[in-house]
Image: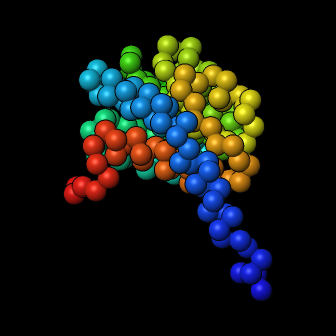
Amino acid sequence: RLMRDFNYKTYFNKYKELAFNEEIYPLLNEFKSIALKVKNENAKLIFAGNGASAAISAHAAVDFTKQAKVRGITFNEADLITCYSNDFGYENWMSEAIKSYYNKNDVVVLTSVSGESPSTVNAAKTAKDLGLKVVTFSGKDFENSLKSIGDINFWVDSRAYNIVECIHMIWVTTVIDSIVGKAEYEV
């Protein structure tokens, strides 16, 4: 009974409509250009997020580093998160980690479905104060706090967490593959 109540076609059409709209192409190219500039300057991409957004950040950091040869880091270690949260408050842990790990010409990439997570918004403000470029991935409300701070903003017009998160993953891995120059490759 439950399977009949869920319309897969409608669900997957949301992905088609939101993720694969040609209006996203210029943003993908802009992020690609920034990533290549980071590579050429021997800088790094600093990824951060909470929950599933942290998992997306970890995946992005590894694949940018390994596949696209653009150095990426993230702050998903439990000891780092708990140490910085304990000492500076959860809303400031990402900001303080960025202060500890950034170098000139690094770019901060922040992911938050709502665009309102205090730790992520504060991290964006800190990155801007440090003179770093900020790339954001968000959803829900068009006028969210994170998006208002970013230099390049990927926004999904949906309130569905799984849809927003999966589209963020599609977009970030698309940029990686565009740097590699193909979708299928070995190691």
Residue at 63 percent of width and 34 percent of height: 120
Residue 91 seen in the figure: no
Residue at 33 percent of width and 23 percent of height: 37
Q: Is residue 42 left or right of residue 22?
A: left
Q: How far across and how far down the image is residue 145, in percent?
A: 71, 28
For this rendering, which residue is in front, 114 or 117? 114
For this rendering, which residue is in front, 27 or 43? 27
For this rendering, which residue is in front, 85 or 1? 1
Q: How far across and how far down the image is residue 186, in percent?
A: 22, 57
The quadrant holding residue 116 is: top right
Above/below status of 87 relative to 104: below
Display colour scheme: rainbow
Residue at 56 percent of width and 17 percent of height: 128
Q: Is residue 35 left or right of residue 51?
A: left
Above/below status of 88 relative to 186: above
The quadrant holding residue 95 is: top right
Q: Quadrant of the N terminus?
A: bottom right
Which residue extends farthest left? 186
Residue at 58 percent of width and 20 percent of height: 126
Residue 178 seen in the figure: yes
Q: How far across and how far down the image is residue 91, in percent?
A: 68, 33
Above/below status of 178 relative to 32: below
Q: How far across and how far down the image is residue 17, in percent?
A: 62, 50
